[in-house]
Amino acid sequence: MSTKISRKDFIKLVGLGGVAFASGLGRAAFAAGAKAGYGAEPGDDFFFVQLSDPHWGFTGPKVNPEAKITIPRTIAAVNALKHKPDFIVFTGDLTHTTDDDQERRERMKEFKRLIAGLKVKDVKLMPGEHDAALDEGAAFKEVFQQETHYTFDHKGIHFIVLDNVSDPHGAIGGAQLDWLQRDLAKLAADRPIVVFTHRPLFDLAPQWDWATQDGAKALALLQPFAHVTVFYGHIHQELHTKTGNVVHHAAKSLIFPLPAPNSSAPKSDRTPVPWNPAKTGLGWRVVDADPDESRYTLAERPCVAKGKA
């Protein structure tokens, strides 16, 4: 599916001037830094790939009988992109949960070996609750040799990776909020900011664990900034929301879709959608900007084998 909309309408949709976004295996083209003067020049647009919730180690033929090949197929799709992304980010739940500490580490090591096949070597990782909630991120830090929260800058955009999963209660925590406040204090109010989280920062469906216990505190720190976009996973579906000045975009999962928020009240009803190869709910959106920035083309692409959808 491909849709063309005007630049004005697209900016109104995303609520962030000069930014084209993507979710799932999405490509995001960023023009926001160019006019702001944060180390970017006109023509410095770029895109990255966001992948979310691959749940390596998951088994369930009724939900995804292709679980063993979904990630390799996705890696092949990313490698086949005509233009290579500047970086790739996985927004959590790299592996499927297990109570066995050793098995958790083995799954992470297997996942690490799989993504070594990506042709783009700048790969940003962050945990989901399946990776980190049972051991406060210990296995993640050990296997991937990195912290669960960090920042980086790229072509005028300030990126913040927040960890709202290592706390077993689904909180960011006071220490990390203090760290966030210190980081934001260094930035001008018009600096474009992109935040990556696993859980949504707002209360989407708290009874389903689709919220962050102290997410409102993080959003309060972000509200003074004019251009803030949050990319997250966890809910295994595309969703676009705005809270104050902050725009939120959820990514599809690479392994199985989940029901729409609050479509079933009891928490136990938050079960994966049964496998349907004609409509899997897995995939990505490609967003391309015309050179004059006057039009954008949005194209939805399924994450299934060729000829199946």
Image: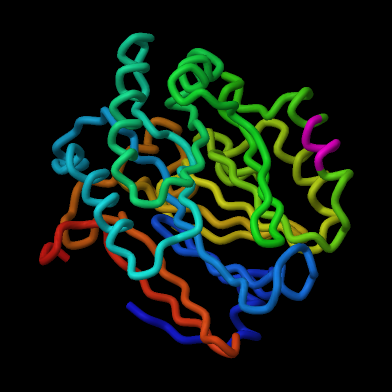
Q: What range is drawn magenta here? A: 179-183
Q: Position of residue 121 (x, y in %)?
A: 42, 46
Q: Position of residue 292 (x, y in %)?
A: 59, 90
- Colour scheme employed for the rendering of this structure: rainbow
Residue 89, image x, y percentages: 48, 47
**Count of marks overlaid on the render:** 0
Q: Residue at x 38, y 9 (%)?
A: 101
Residue sticking out furthest to the left = 307
> What x and y, as percent, mark residue 45?
59, 71
Q: Is residue 233 above or below residue 100?
A: below
State the residue in front, 96 or 263: 96
Left or right: residue 257 compared with residue 24: left
Residue at 57% in and 19% down: 168
> Which of 251 and 149 lies nearest the eye of the viewer?
149
Q: Name the quarter where the N terminus is drawn.
A: bottom left
* Residue 213 located within the stretch drawn in magenta: no
Going by the image, does 116 lie left or right of 191?
left
Residue under the point 37% across and 47% down: 253
Above or below, 95 against 87 in this view is above
Image: 57 above or below 295: above
- Quarter of the figure that contains the C terminus: bottom left
Q: Is residue 17 left or right of residue 92?
A: right
Classified by dominant secondary structure, the portion drawn in magenta counts as helix
In the picture, residue 103 is in which quadrant? top left
